[in-house]
Amino acid sequence: DTAVSQTPKYLVTQMGNDKSIKCEQNLGHDTMYWYKQDSKKFLKIMFSYNNKELIINETVPNRFSPKSPDKAHLNLHINSLELGDSAVYFCASSPSRTSGSSYNEQFFGPGTRLTVL
Amino acid sequence: GDSVTQMEGPVTLSEEAFLTINCTYTATGYPSLFWYVQYPGEGLQLLLKATKADDKGSNKGFEATYRKETTSFHLEKGSVQVSDSAVYFCALITGRRALTFGSGTRLQVQP
């Protein structure tokens, strides 16, 4: 029933480790996103994919690499984790332009709280 | 670049009080405007939206009107409930298709 799902919900790891967060949407949307929410609740776009093609890549360290195996999935892999990577990461999706007035609406997953020790 | 400015919180109100959360924006082109709500421990939910000037978005008793002349999209509710306690985010989107968010405003409603 879940529209946009993320795993895991919580991730606690040591500095220097490599970890992945997975995202799946069953809404049939064409575009998916990763946003980062910092400790002050500020949200910022990291990446966006449209039909498996990267269309937005903000100034994010190269340690972050998104991967979209198909348009329903967008995973985020993080190498060499640092303390500053601790945040909540949200996946979102939105429909195509042909869907009419709702195409700008983004549907968010429940978030993954990453804690780097 | 695009930006959204929201009033700082927390906003603390008694139940049934009137709520206003101010939001102003700067954007290239003609953005669509949104209010998202984040309940404790949860993801973001779309509360309402407006896609052109003078449009009014409304949902669950909340309203906001797209004011192009003042570049504002203030959120209002006539009578808040304890269950409205959450963080509210104003956001915009342009052709770039990524949301630009304000800093969020925490609302605390006391019984």
Image (cartoon, rainbow, N blue to C red):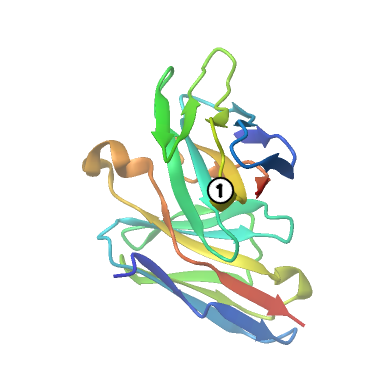
The residue at 23%/43% (across/down) is A99
**In the figure, is residue A73 to the left or right of B96?**
left
Q: Is residue B88 left or right of residue B56?
A: right
- Residue A29: image quadrant is bottom left
Q: Nearer the viewer, residue A6 or A20?
A: A6
User: Between A89 and B78, which is closer to the camera in this rendering?
Assistant: B78
Check disc 1: other Cα within 10 Å, few if <14, some if 14-19, many if 20+: some
Whole-percent x and y of residue B34? Answer: 48, 38
Please indicate, yes or no, whether residue B97 appears anywhere in the rendered image.
no
Measured as percent of width and height from the top left, residue A91 is found at 47, 63
Looking at the rendered image, the quarter that the N terminus of chain B falls into is top right
Q: Name the image quarter holding residue A97.
A: top left
Residue at the image point whose x is 73% and y is 79% from the top: A116
**Against B1, is A79 above or below?**
below
Q: Position of residue B17 (x, y in %)?
A: 62, 34
Secondary structure of the residue carrying tag 1 is helix
Q: Which residue is mark 1?
A: B84
Q: Is A60 left, or right, of A9 in this rendering?
A: right
Residue occupying image coordinates x 54% and y 52%: B83
Residue B66 position within the rendered picture, expressed as x and y whole percent measured from the top left: 48, 23
In the rendered image, is residue A6 in sight? yes
Q: How many marks?
A: 1
Chain identifier of the residue bearing label 1 in the image: B
Q: Where, by quadrant of the figure, is residue B69 drawn? A: top right
Q: Residue at x 62, y 84 (%)?
A: A18
Q: Amino acid at mark 1?
A: Asp
